[in-house]
Image: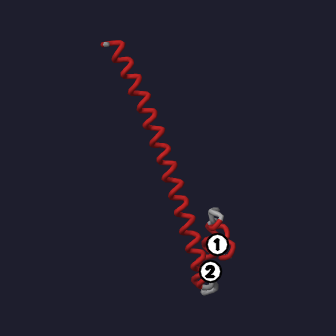
Amino acid sequence: MIKEAILKAVARENLSYECAEEVMHEIMEGKASEIQMAAYLTAMSVKDEHLSIRQRNEKSNNVRAALDNLKIVINIFICIFQRKWG
């Protein structure tokens, strides 16, 4: 199971709960080699870092969209202000 989990993690696919649980059992029972354990942990770390970057980019895009919306609202208020008191 650890080999399949490594391949999934490298492909940035999510592991099912059952798969992750089976991998942990293999590791805890000594069925996984040190190389497999290192590969699994490294692949999961890289996968998580990739997700963190994607989430940061999504948040950044959300902030940009909010700022764009705020600019629109401010411009509307400026137009209203200029018409009323300009």
Classify 54 as above or below 82. below
Query: Label 1 crowding class (10 Å Cα cut-off): few <14, some 14-19, many 20+?
Result: many
On the image, the x and y values in percent for residue 22 come to 64, 75
Classify 53 as above or below 71. below
On the image, the x and y values in percent for residue 76 come to 41, 22
Q: Which residue is at a point 48% across and 53% down the rendered structure image?
A: 56
Amino acid marked by disc 2: Gln
Front residue of 15 and 84: 84
Q: Which residue is at a point 37% across and 22% down the rendered structure image?
A: 77
Query: Residue 47 lies in what quarter of the image?
Result: bottom right
On the image, the x and y values in percent for residue 69 come to 45, 32
Query: Residue 40 lies in what quarter of the image?
Result: bottom right
Element under disc 2: helix
Q: Count the marks: how many?
A: 2
Element under disc 1: helix
- Work out which quarter of the rendered image holds the C terminus and state it: top left
Amino acid marked by disc 1: Ile
What's the CA distance linking mark 1 and mark 2?
Answer: 8 Å
The residue pinned by badge 2 equals 36
* Mark 1 in CB contact with mark 2 (< 8 angstroms): yes
Q: Which residue is at a point 61% across and 71% down the rendered structure image?
A: 20
The residue pinned by badge 1 equals 6
